[in-house]
Image (cartoon, helix red, strand yellow):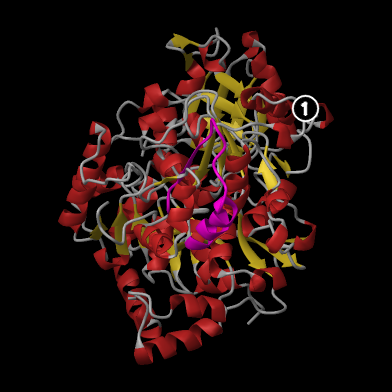
Amino acid sequence: MTPFDQVAGVAAPMMAPNVDTDVIMPKMFLKGVDRSGLGEGAFNLLRFSGGKVNPDFILNQDGYRDACFLVVGPNFGCGSSREHAVWGLQQLGIRALIGTSFAGIFNDNCANNGLLTISLDPERVTELASVITDRSRNDVAVDLSAQTIRFDRGRRTMPFEIEPARKEAFLTGRDFIASTLVYADDIRAFEARHRAASPWMF
Amino acid sequence: MAARTLYDKLVDAHVVRNLDDAGLVLLYVDRTVLNEYTSPQAFAGLRAAGRKVWNPKAALMVVDHVNPTAARRVRAMPDSAATRQVDYFAENARDFGIEYFDILDPRQGIEHVVAPEQGLVMPGMVIAAGDSHSTAYGAFGALGYGIGTSDIEHYLATSTVRYRRLKTMRIHLSGTAAPFGVTPKDIVMEVIRRIGADGATGYAVEFSGPAVSDMSVEGRIVMSIMIVEAGARGVVIAPDQKVLDYLKGRPRSPKGEMWERAATNWHALSSDPSAKFDREVTLDVSEVAPLVTWGTSPDQAIAVTDNVPDPVKQAEPHRKAAAMRALSYMGLTPGTSIQSVPIDFAFIGSCTNARIEDLRDAAEIFRGRRVAAGVRAIVVPGSTQVRVQAEAEGLAKVFTDAGVEWRQSGCSMCLAMNDDVLSPGQRCASSTNRNFEGRQGPGSRTHLMSPAMVAAAAVTGRITDVRSLLGGSHQ
């Protein structure tokens, strides 16, 4: 996965609750066997309507087209277990999502691909969203090492929490499978014990 | 040892090693089921890294999302992208030595219907699979949950996943459901409506209580699948005699002396009486009415006897805006009776509600009635075995006599990745689990409800309280 340390850029507010993975990556884009074309798929039915660019969609508006952060409403990424949603957001240039809560599978998918999800209190998310709504003050810098979000032309800073193991993985861009295979002997030993205790499972 | 929940016991029994001090573990996973659309990139990753599958026998591959459901089924897919996906799927099965049910296999069907049918899901297991509705397996006293493609790759390579322990939520169901018209689907929709679409995010849910004991195993599967729409990341229900009766004699269930050993073990699987849950939710199921969604999130539901709600009453501004957008998308006006809303399409199918009991419920309503003029109704059984059984029981004839299309099995119009797709603006009474914007086709409008309620809507042409059709001998 792509390492993440310090990223600065524009953030777009997308505050609706329960933005699901069908919206993030419509099903027409799920028929591949690789990860290609998913940037076009991301938010496709919102970005385009009737073959035209939809001017109402936030990422089509002046000041938000090059967003690398989304500030989102609660339960972002709910619904289908489609990692295509994460790959598509990344192909669209999104590096981090900032919100109150993220759906479980989606959150894990983000972590596995280096798309940072930051959970904050609702008041903090609202504060950040209200600042970036003012295009003249839309600059956000996420520093993962320091665990801070700097915004409002550098005048305000918010700390954020992240589990140490997850932080380490983001900073290093670790290959989780290789890390796990270091414990192959542990897995084999567990498997032998498990098979002895519950042979009907094998 | 301190009192533990069933969830804790299942996790403890599968920890290979701890990865940090905060509950991150390497968790052994007993089994997975793979489908054609969330697995390709995982296999590509294995190929690129030159990795093998750790235990090919622990996996099963089933085509279920892209396959057409037309009556005359052939192996070839009409869509070249689907063909490529299925071809790659078959190639992966062959190259990595994993059992594969293609669409003409008599055991084919939706993964969450097929795995239990084959006896692959047993109490005490951990089963993670690349589909959010893998929570289905909780109905058997297994810990079931959905994972993404990277985690599928990790699982295939190591038989483990990196796993962080969840908080636990007990959903206690007391009372007795109304004898007619109120189903497990309605009960779980009521829970979701009360706790919200993110009400169980970060939790593993245990369903308990007398109303769960009263429920069939298939009913428990419905709840275990659907509660994922409240964000649950895992489900468990303590196994009882009904679960053992369901499993006995299945193709992959243990036999003879091994069955006896397993059964003894399974009977002991439950939460300790004094185990503490992080959150408790209770519901008296006698209060539950048939439910139907009015919006585009599964928690936007009302009793079928109610009117479309007014978002003005919603205080939180973003939720209010979401409700207004949902009403606009759904073409509904606040205050109108939901029973006055006409439908164009009726769909009975999906992993949530396409098992034999669901089809029996629907057939009860269709028997002796006709699908209303202007409505297209299709029934897509959850598996080829369900299809065969429904034909043997005479249900298929009830459907076709009523003017319902009787199809081959698959996920079909739940996420509409095959050729069963609604047109923009079409309104569907649907036994599925998700009413998201565009889910059944761009611009489509989905109302979630039980299979019997879908059948009632199909025969009247509008959303209908199924209880009004259950008169006479049914009372």
User: In the image shown, does A105 or B452 lie closer to the viewer?
Assistant: B452
Image quadrant in which the N terminus of chain B is located: bottom right
Residue that extends furthest to the bottom in the rendered view of this protein: B257
Position of residue B292 measured from the top left corner of the image (x, y, whole percent): 67, 43
Q: Is residue B162 above or below residue B78?
A: below
Local packing at callout 1 (Cα closer than 10 Å; few below 14, some 14-19, many 20+) is some
**Count of numbered labels shown in the rendering:** 1
Q: Is residue A75 above or below residue A140?
A: below
Q: Chain of mark 1?
A: B
Q: Is residue A187 above or below residue A172?
A: below
Q: Kindly state the secondary structure of the residue where label 1 is placed.
A: loop
Residue under circle 1? B334
Position of residue A168 measured from the top left corner of the image (x, y, whole percent): 46, 46
Position of residue B290 measured from the top left corner of the image (x, y, whole percent): 70, 50
User: In the image shown, does B371 or B139 lie closer to the viewer?
Assistant: B371
Position of residue A101 measured from the top left corner of the image (x, y, whole percent): 62, 41
> What amino acid is at disc 1?
Pro
Q: Which residues are magenta?
A: B356-381
Q: Can residue B20 be seen in this snapshot?
A: no
User: In the image shown, does B231 or B297 lie closer to the viewer?
Assistant: B297
